[in-house]
Amino acid sequence: MTVDNSMSSGYCSLDEDLEDCFFTARTTLFRSPQSKFAAKNVTKTVEEEKPKAPTIQELKEKIDNYNSKVNNCLLMKLNDDGTYTGFIKVHLKLRRPVTVPAGIRPQSIYDALKEVNLANMTEKRTSFYLPLDAIKQLHISSTTTVNEVIQGLLKKFMVVDNPQKFALFKQMQKDGQVLSQKLSVTEFPLYLRLLAGPDTDILSFVLKENETGEVEWDDFSIPELQNFLVILEREEKDKIQQVQKKYDRFKQRLQEALKEANGKPG
């Protein structure tokens, strides 16, 4: 599996309404964007039956039909042994910081070809937020599982967190609603892409945290927890400053309005 970079790097924090945000470790690990207005799209969980494995002839017909709808060079290719290769795009929507090696340069093409694991070259760790809504394009096989896709994405970003902390979801749009389903680690994303066609509005893949309810603190090392505290303290200071600036502006406008009102007769 190969990974193509299609995003810009940089620090990305979370955006919520300031009035609705509380700055604690628990809410940072679990919080989700809130809005004063009703969401147009509602996320629902979808239960579907697994499709039957197609014959080679059926695969050829499906791949030919798929390629006829592709408007770029990202075609699927059928191999003689009945397997096939193609491309999927994965949206990264991670709201918790990830753990990466400290002071390690980005992975080069040479490192990828030689399968050099830069994360093993140092024991120092740091944490940061991956940019929200980043998109990674993957070239995978029909035998590539969801688990392998997750591991490949983490390796690309040199994330050393346990892959079980993450999950791959498929999202579909139907009747103006966004339907979301968590994929099993043994499913094959490329086959789902083939069935849905190349239109990402019909089917898209999203990498999120694997929500299991309560935080399993034993899964985190002491350096990870310490890094979380540093990040949360920095976030808290930033949000407090935003709140103070917001209400300072409101106070200033209110004082100006009172001043104008006091200067008017009656």
Image (spheres, rainbow, N blue to C red):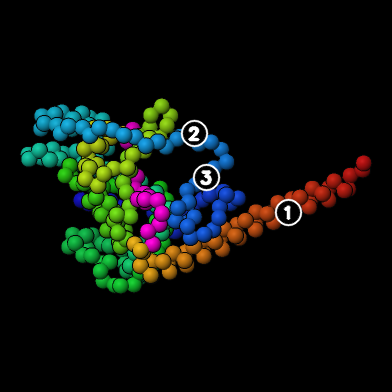
Tell whether position 211 is magenta: yes
**Which contiguous range is marked in magenta?**
200-217
Q: Residue at x 25, y 54 (%)?
A: 152
Label 1–label 3 contact, CB within 8 A = no
The residue carrying pointer 1 sits among few (fewer than 14), some (14 to 19) or many (20 or more) residues within 10 Å by Cα, namely few
Q: Is residue 202 above or below residue 220?
A: above
Graded by Cα atoms within 10 Å as few (under 14), some (14 to 19) or many (20 or more), the crowding at tag 3 reads some
Name the quadrant of the C terminus.
Answer: top right
Residue with the mark numbered 3 = 34
Which residue matches tag 1? 251
Residue 198: x and y in percent read 28, 35
Q: Are marks 2 and 3 in contact (CB under 8 Å)?
A: no
- Foreground: disc 1 or disc 2: 2
Q: Nearer the viewer, residue 129 or 265?
A: 129
Q: For mark 2, what is the residue?
A: 40
Residue 10 in the image, given as x and y percentages of width and height = 42, 58
Along the line of sight, the residue nearer the viewer: 75 or 51: 51
Three-letter residue code for mark 3: Gln
Q: Looking at the image, is mark 2 or mark 3 earlier in the sequence?
A: 3
